[in-house]
Image (spheres, rainbow, N blue to C red):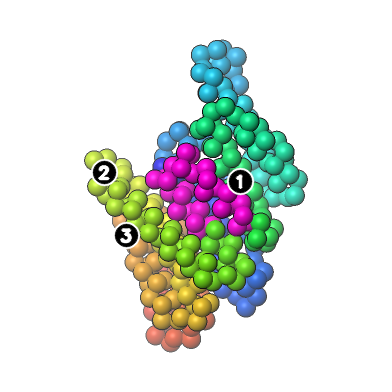
Amino acid sequence: MHLFGRSTIASGTLALILLGSSFGKASASGQNPPLQTQTSGSSAPTRHDSVEVTAHLSPEEVEEGKLNDAYEAIAEQQRKGACTAEIIERYESEVIPLAEKSAFKVPMSKFLFLANRDIGNCYLAKQDFVEAEASFRRLLQYAPVWPGTDDSAYPINFRQIATAQMGQQRWQGAEESLRKSVSLFDQQIDSAMKSNSEFSRTGLAGNLRGSKAMSLAYLGIVYLREGHSADALATVDSAFAEANQPNVPSTVVSSIVKIGRSIAQVSGDKGAIAKWAQRS
């Protein structure tokens, strides 16, 4: 299960910028580490560059290693902050065609998911919101195979779609995408809380709640831009309540507070302004 991570925080910064008067112009971090922090090694790309080890791998594992080597050569450069047209072109010419030719469904879906996700984040950084949305939508066809619709990367991707829609000022579409994100997180949180695993009931549930809180905060922004100030304030209050649940990363609370204060200021509601000024 993927969890809340630095790329999501970068999107939170984007949301804050989008609250400004020039909504169509936004920025996003060019850095692109994995979208979330993994809880197991199953989701992280692994290297198979040892001849001795390769001899004991299955054909599918060898294929995954080959795809991972191609992907990591570009992703590592992107993580250093180089989100350029060259990065996008390399994903499209070096990783995607190689993955599409794979005879194995899981490695193929995994690296098509990762490459298109990273391309989408690159387009967000370049403020090309139309292409960003198209890239994130492509992930929907790969996610059922890898990482799975029960993984938090799935609802997070709907929030990424919404971020691109917000950049285009397509508020109704963004609202629908964020509602979907919140609904999926609710299902995953419910599943985690019913698990026999203590980690699922604590750490995993806390991270899922934190990511759900961010989707709610974004939804508050959308309501505000749709002219529904009362709904915006109520929704960001819900985000704050969710972020204050046990085991939610403290960075989430900070992001929610920044968004809540901005929404309160734009709404002009003096009571809300005072309330959010007291929150930390």
Circle 2: element type: loop
- Left or right: 170, with 237 as reference point: right
Circle 3: element type: loop
Can residue 259 be found in the magenta stretch?
no
Q: Amino acid at mark 2?
A: Ser
Q: Amino acid at mark 3?
A: Gln
Q: Which residues are magenta?
A: 132-160
Judged by depth in the image, the label closer to the viewer, 3 or 2, is 2
- Give the percent coordinates (x, y) of residue 134: 62, 55
Residue for badge 1? 116
Asked where in the image residue 182 lies, by quadrant, the reply is bottom left
Q: Nearer the viewer, residue 46 or 176?
A: 176
- Gap between marks 1 and 3, in whole Å? 33 Å
Give the mark nearer the N terminus: 1 vs 3. 1
Residue for badge 3? 245
Q: Amino acid at mark 1?
A: Asn
Residue placed at 36% from the left, 69% from the top?
A: 238
Q: Nearer the viewer, residue 119 or 27?
A: 119
- Gap between marks 3 and 2, in whole Å? 18 Å
- Give the percent coordinates (x, y) of residue 170: 57, 70
Residue for badge 2? 195
Q: Is residue 169 above or below residue 132?
A: below
Residue placed at 60% from the left, 71% from the top?
A: 169
Q: How many numbered discs sit on the rendered protein?
A: 3
Check the picture and name the quadrant holding the N terminus.
Answer: top left
Residue placed at 52% from the left, 42% from the top?
A: 142
- Gap between marks 2 and 1, in whole Å? 32 Å
- Left or right: 274, with 225 as reference point: left
